[in-house]
Amino acid sequence: MLPRPRRGDPLWIWMLHGWDVFSWAIIGLLTLITILGDVPAADRYGSLALVAGLGVGYAVVRTRPGNPVRLAYGYLVLLILVLGVLSWLRDGFGALYTVTLAQFVIFVDSLRGAVLLSGLGAVAITVGGAAREGWSAGTLTTNAVSSVAVYAVSVVIALLTPRALALRDERARLRSRLADAEQRLAEAQKRQGAAEERERIAREIHDTLAQGFASIVVLAEAARAGMADEPGRSAQQLQSIERTARENLAEARVLVGSAPRDGVAAGSVAATLRRTLDRFAEDTGLAVDAELPDVDCDQPTRIALLRCTQESLANVRKHAAASTVGVVLAAGPEGIELEITDDGKGFVPGAGESPPGGGADGARDGAVPAGGFGLDGMRRRLAEFGGELTVTSSPGDGTRILVTVPATGTPADGPLAEAHLPAGHLPAGHLPAGPPVDPSRTPGTATDGQV
């Protein structure tokens, strides 16, 4: 038995069920005409009884749970008998066969059943009409021709319906596959999001807490070593330890969401970087040559520039053995550029091996560990802004870190661009170097490229 149409079913299935509903509207109209019209009593009551019995049978099939096949076939047998008797009782009632054609498809479970039962319906109205009009060759032929024509339509309907059902089932399978694919995609995106969040948290911890703890360890070792000979210097280092610990606590609260992120890199980017450089010079005793004009940028960009500066200075502290660090900040047509240079040992960017005696992060001979987590974290952080990181270095020639972050609202190219820069600035791409990195000094000079 053909189930009631569902959303997404082909139009043909909806048309069949619509035809079924329409057939009962016609039957109801004929019943009303029978009641109100001038019909002999025997024909009137006989017609009404047959239609009532057919209606009860239809209601039983439609409301019976599960709609068993035998019950549906029983109803169709009843329909054939009613059509035959009505064709015998009333003139023109053979047209009900045409009206009820859809039922011969809806209430069967096979093409053979639909063809056979609709054929029996055609025979029933032919025999009923001939019995009412008289058994003559002409009458029988006329009734047979009209019945066969309607039966041919019934066969076409029975042939098209399985194709419509196959299309419906195929669509159902496609919808199921699409739903499965969407679920798998959602799960994959969830896993990717979780992995990206873990990576982001790891990067934040590395750039904040881990660097702070490393600074505390270095300062504590220096303070302990100098307690006897340089008590003033040791006291200053203990104050730096306290300050760093408090900053780490504030960073931890930001990471766990118990403190607003607005407190990170508060104020202008120049002031933020200046505080960081002053602390670095105080803790390490290195000379810091900084050119930090006031550059307008948003909070996320300030944080990114701060983290890159902190990571670069941490690498200088741990690996470079430098005496001077240069930091230059500038804004130009392409965005904001931050250059950090040192005159330390340098290294070979991209060298992944870590020979004996290398740095804790795998550095072989210089300022930044080749392939270390810090550089990779800086690249990923800048990539979120469409920024780039370029590392230029070679053994013995120091290291140059260039950070480029696109910024909205920067001056356009042309003569007016430089006019908009604060005093002491050069346009982006023409940053004055701090301690020089001379690429021509040795063939080992290398650039790790851009993200």
Image (spheres, rainbow, N blue to C red):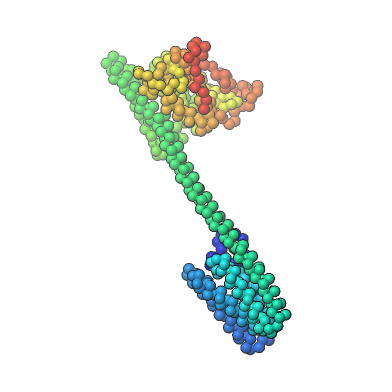
Relative vertical location of residue 90 with respect to residue 307 in this rendering, above or below? below
Q: Is residue 277 visible?
A: no
Identified at 45% across, 37% down, the residue is 196
Q: What is the residue that sits farthest to the left in this orientation?
A: 228
Q: What is the residue that sits farthest to the front in this orientation?
A: 137
Identified at 70% across, 83% down, the residue is 136
Q: Position of residue 355 (x, y in %)?
A: 37, 19
Identified at 52% across, 32% down, the residue is 385
In this orientation, which residue lies closer to the viewer: 291 or 441? Answer: 441
Relative vertical location of residue 196 with respect to residue 376 in this rendering, above or below? below
Identified at 42% across, 27% down, the residue is 373
In this orientation, which residue lies closer to the viewer: 34 or 255? Answer: 34
In this orientation, which residue lies closer to the viewer: 341 or 250? Answer: 341
Q: What is the residue that sits farthest to the right in this orientation?
A: 138
Q: Position of residue 223 (x, y in %)?
A: 31, 20
Relative vertical location of residue 400 with respect to residue 88 in this rendering, above or below? above
